[in-house]
Amino acid sequence: MSIAWICGPHKLSTWDQYHRDDFLGRFSHTSIETFNDLPTDWFHVKHPEPIPAAPDLYKEHLEDLVSYIKTAAQSQNLVSPGDLEHLWERHILDSLSPLLWSGELSLEEPGNWVDMGSGAGFPVLPLAICLPHWTFYAIEPRRLRVQHLENSALHLKLSNLNVVGSKAETAALLPQLREQANIVSARAVGKIPDDAKRARPFLNKRGWFLTYKHNEQVQGIDGYHPLSYVRYRLPSGDEPRTLVLAPISSI
């Protein structure tokens, strides 16, 4: 549904020692065994980096999403033509990579998730399917993409997904969104510092900024602890990908 249209037992991935120590230092109250006690159908390990996998419970629903995107792409340029035959790996599994770090992101508990620049629906659609106890907000300023996201939510019966037709800076002014998010994500939107600054007004005091990156790295962001770069790999990929995690330090 649309809430607004506003005009205008596996090991964690191999990290470099600095970021690993920094990350675990912030979670000193939680044992590494707790991080390893994640549902085993959420991921498997083939390389030093973990590989995202679709939870068995939601595979059929995710396959429906793939079929729907392929049909919708006939009338709207949602993904590159070369990606249409690789939607499952390049977009579904890639979108689900945060599930690999369920423990540190507290994904087992209900929460609010804001996705900035949702576009074709990745990562927000796969995540909304696999985390039905979370409430998602897809922030997207382009009207055709907003219509696509609304239609997708209806087709997939995602009652936990709200579509907000607005730029992130404007959506952050809405009372139901400002300082309410446990997680704010961005995938293929902008540079890390820029996206983090857009994310900050949405985050609550324990919130996380999360972004998917291949090569871009920065040492830190104003208002955030130093970032953690956690690596994962797609099933047929030779190069690791990176999920950037940054907890907000203050509001």
Image: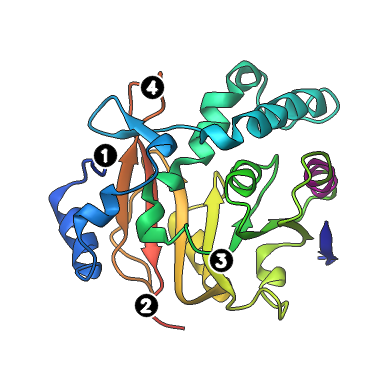
Q: Is residue 233 left or right of residue 14?
A: right
Pinpoint residue 7: horizontal percent, then vertical percent: 85, 65
Q: From the image, tell me which residue sits under label 1.
A: 10
Dot 3 crowding, Cα within 10 Å, few <14, some 14–19, many 20+: some
Which label was assigned to residue 249?
2
**How much space separates mark 3 and mark 2, taking CA atoms?**
19 Å
Q: Secondary structure at mark 2?
A: loop
Dot 4 crowding, Cα within 10 Å, few <14, some 14–19, many 20+: few
- First in sequence, mark 4 or 3: give its number: 3
Please tell me which residue lies in front, 5 or 1. Answer: 1
Q: From the image, tell me which residue sits under label 4.
A: 237
In the rendered image of this protein, does residue 159 appear above or below residue 7? above
Q: Secondary structure at mark 4?
A: loop
Dot 2 crowding, Cα within 10 Å, few <14, some 14–19, many 20+: some
Pinpoint residue 12: horizontal percent, then vertical percent: 26, 44
Please tell me which residue lies in front, 62 or 211. Answer: 62
Name the amino acid type tagged 4: Gly
Name the amino acid type tagged 1: His
